[in-house]
Image (cartoon, grey):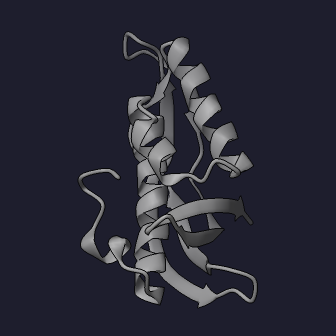
Amino acid sequence: MPSDLPDAAREETKAGAAAFGKYYYETFGNATDSGQTGDLEKLSADECKVCSTSVSGIQADMKKGWTRSENPYSITNVKAQKRSDSGYKVSMSVKVAAHTREDANGKENGHVKATTYTLTQHVAWENDRWQMLDWIVT
């Protein structure tokens, strides 16, 4: 697991599920900024299709030399609720700051407008740690 994973996100509790979900999306934002997906991959379950698609997209941009100008995501209102099947449903409000996509020379080659949305995740405790199973933006 990433060394900066908060202690709360290492606990098999409702609060741990919420902390993990928040950390996951912060890590996603950092990956879009840096192009580095290693930590994001460590947090994702093998069967998480949206996770692998997101990682592939970040890696494809990185091969072109493209990254985001910053981690544009601010996360608030994080809540976890036990699911009837397994794990927790973690929801949060995400505010996306206006930002740019930049090429390897730091030159702007795309602009993303500010927006807000709700992120809903399915996290589960597997192999003595939380893993991301799925997520959706609404």
- Drawn side of residue 42 relative to residue 59, left or right: left
Q: Residue at x 65, y 40 (%)?
A: 52
Q: How many discs appear?
A: 0
Residue 109 visible, this orientation? no
- Drawn side of residue 100 relative to residue 23, left or right: right
Q: Nearer the viewer, residue 2 or 77?
A: 2
Q: Position of residue 74 (x, y in %)?
A: 43, 62
- Drawn side of residue 96 relative to residue 129, left or right: right
Q: Quadrant of residue 115?
A: bottom right
Q: Residue at x 38, y 40 (%)?
A: 70
Asked if 69 appears above or below 25 in the picture, the reply is above
Asked if 43 appears above or below 52 in the picture, the reply is below
Q: Position of residue 98 (x, y in %)?
A: 50, 46
Q: Position of residue 61 (x, y in %)?
A: 57, 22
The C terminus: image quadrant: bottom right
Q: Residue at x 36, y 72 (%)?
A: 9
Q: Position of residue 78 (x, y in %)?
A: 49, 80
Residue 24 visible, this orientation? yes
Q: Quadrant of residue 71?
A: top left
Q: Nearer the viewer, residue 86 or 73?
A: 86
Asked if 24 appears above or below 112 in the picture, the reply is below
Q: Quadrant of residue 135?
A: bottom right
Q: Nearer the viewer, residue 113 or 22?
A: 22
